[in-house]
Amino acid sequence: GASACERVWQTIAGPENLHPTGYDPGTANPYVRPSGVFVADIEEFTLLLDHSMSAPTLGISSDARKTVGYIYTEDSEMCRSHPSRAVAPVELTEDVVPSTSAPCYIRPNQTAPIGGLDFFTIGTLLGAAGVDLDTPSPVSGEEGHTNRREGVLLVINIMYKNFKPFAGAGDVYYEYKVFSIPTTPKLQKTFITNYPNQRVVQSIHGIKIHIIQSGKIGKFSLLMLMITIAAGLTMMAVANFVVDSVALYLLPERDHFSRLKYPIGKIKKQPGVPDDDLYAVSSHPAFMTTESEALSDSDAD
């Protein structure tokens, strides 16, 4: 015959809520509701990052102990109140200018004044991503629950740079860009407490953090400079040819443009100069309609 489910399992939080059969039809609420346990002050937990980069073709490498980094954020509250906020990285401005509005850059805490590693509080990372744990979760189907209950997925993008406007390549620095993905990070564990009658299923939600590395590192190259100059001059020549062709041969005012581009001069015949040489002077296609005018000028012999 067809198989049937003879037992109803349920998620429990502790032995005090456990019914011997896991289901008590004689009570008003026969299913035991799982209890929720939260970690206190999760925003004060810290995360330390040790990372490095290498560009072998350029011969450039660096790590978190040799360079400095900043957190880029568009959170208005952080840009107005954070003690280490700045309008731009000091590598670009050469001076720390406190910000008063978003976006801004936040200098992370370090394990040592020189050669230290960056570490952040979870609250700083959440603020940089614009996430509040006590607001409703953006995950579809979980609108009635908060981010603190459902969990948050954060992505930290470490972007390495060494280009300064109007200065070219310089020392390597990096930016942290933090953003969230609307999903529910979850881990489930099952424990058999009294086989085969009882089990406990733990559904653990939390803050999951992914880290990716990217960036744009440059170095001066004489060869690339020459190629860029040659390509620019070529494009200017092509643009000049196209504009001249349209103006001299396609536009209704082409005769007017041809006279402006190639002015007609008066030719005076010199003794011993054949007439063929006079014709060659005005044989440009732009003058084909005005050759007779040039050769019949009163100053020409």
Image (cartoon, rainbow, N blue to C red):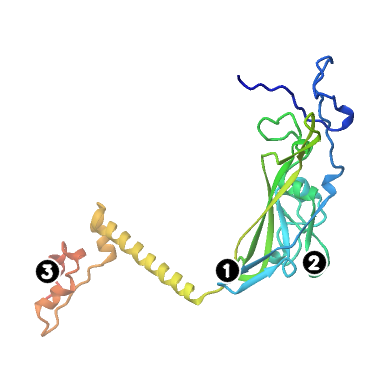
Reading the image, the residue beneath label 1 is 218
CB within 8 Å, label 2 to label 3:
no
Residue for point 31% across, 63% down: 241
Residue found farthest to the right: 16
What number is the disc on residue 296? 3
Q: Residues within 10 Å of mark 2 (few under 14, many from 20)?
A: some
Look at discs 2 and 3 and give the one toward the viewer. Answer: 2
Pick the front one: 284 or 113 = 113
Q: CA distance from mark 2 to mark 3?
A: 88 Å
**Quadrant of the rendered image containing residue 49:** bottom right
Residue found farthest to the front: 1
Counting the numbered discs, the total is 3
What number is the disc on residue 116? 2
For marks 2 and 1, the one nearer the N-term is 2
Q: CA distance from mark 1 to mark 3?
A: 64 Å
Residue for point 69% across, 35% down: 138
Residue 16 % position (x, y): 90, 29
